[in-house]
Each structure stands twice: as structure tokens, then as C-alpha cells.
Image (cartoon, grey):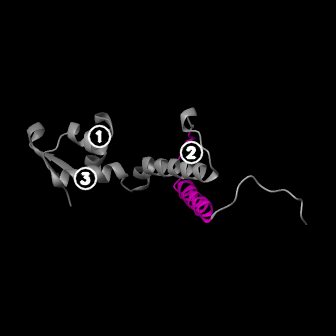
Amino acid sequence: MSSGYTPPFTITSKMLDLTSRIAENLTELKHNKSQVITTMLRKKNRIKTLAGTLEMILEAILKVGNKVGNKVGNLTENQILIIELMKKESKMGAKALAEHVGILIRKIEENVAKLKKMNIIERVGGTRGHWEMKD
């Protein structure tokens, strides 16, 4: 049965892939019982295509997943990067870590505290000391 309706867009394989990835990530977040965090788009970030909309939705979901990663026993991307930087330069401080990771010093301190609590890293020698990775 043909209604003569033509949608204002063409569904592409990229759109189908993004939709599939969104569904997979939403299912994983729901499975991990993380809270739903809604995202708001600013006027300056207006989306001009459906594919662009799907990309932004997927990006937002992945960010939420990274934020709750610690709750489900995984390390976040920022925590992994912090560990890698500490392995390369064991005397690196919070300010340098913040510059390399691209987050606030306060967030570095929060992540370092979580890594210490998870018994992954240890500070040896106080403020002039260095970082050691625990087994």
C-alpha cells in the first residue's frame, strides 16, 4: 500500500550503524542500572542532519557510560589515561596530569583518590615523591 509519503531524509548505512550502537550502549547502561542523564543541546550546536543527531546521541551515551564505569567495576577513560601518564612519568603532579588529560585539577584529584581506593596506585614519598602501580 503506497501512501505517497516521502520522508525528508534518506536512511543510510551510517545512520543504521549509529542507531544500532546507540541501542547497544543504552542496553548496557540499563543493564548496569546507571542513572539516566539527559543531555541538552546548546543553540550553537544545532544539528543539521539526522546522522549528526545520532552521532551526538551516541557520544552523549558513551560519556555517561564512562562516568558510571567506576560503578560497574571498570576504569573510565580518564582513569586509564592517568595511569598511563603516571607509568611514563612517575613524578607527574596533579597540575601536569590535568593539562595532559584535559580535565580540571579537582577531577584529577577525585580520580586519583578512586584509583588509590581501588588499590591500583600508591604515592610513595609524599609531595616530592612518585607514583607506583600496585599489582
- Magenta stretch in the rendered image: 13-39
What type is the residue that disc 3 sits on?
A: Ile
Of residues 31 and 44, the one nearer the viewer is: 44
Q: Residue at x 8, y 39 (%)?
A: 128
- Cα separation, mark 3 vs mark 1, equals 11 Å
Sort mark 1 into few (<14), some (14-19) or many (20+) by Cα contacts within 10 Å: many
- Circles 3 and 2 in contact, beta carbons < 8 Å: no
- Cα separation, mark 3 vs mark 2, equals 28 Å
Asked if one can make out residue 113 in the rendered structure from this viewpoint, the answer is yes
1 left or right, relative to 17: right
Sort mark 2 into few (<14), some (14-19) or many (20+) by Cα contacts within 10 Å: few
- Cα separation, mark 2 vs mark 1, equals 24 Å
Image vertical order of residue 118 relative to residue 21, above or below: above
Residue 48's disc number: none
Q: What residue is disc 2 on? A: 36
Q: What residue is disc 3 on? A: 83
Q: What residue is disc 1 on? A: 108
Q: Main secondary structure of the magenta part?
A: helix
Q: Position of residue 5 (x, y in %)?
A: 84, 56
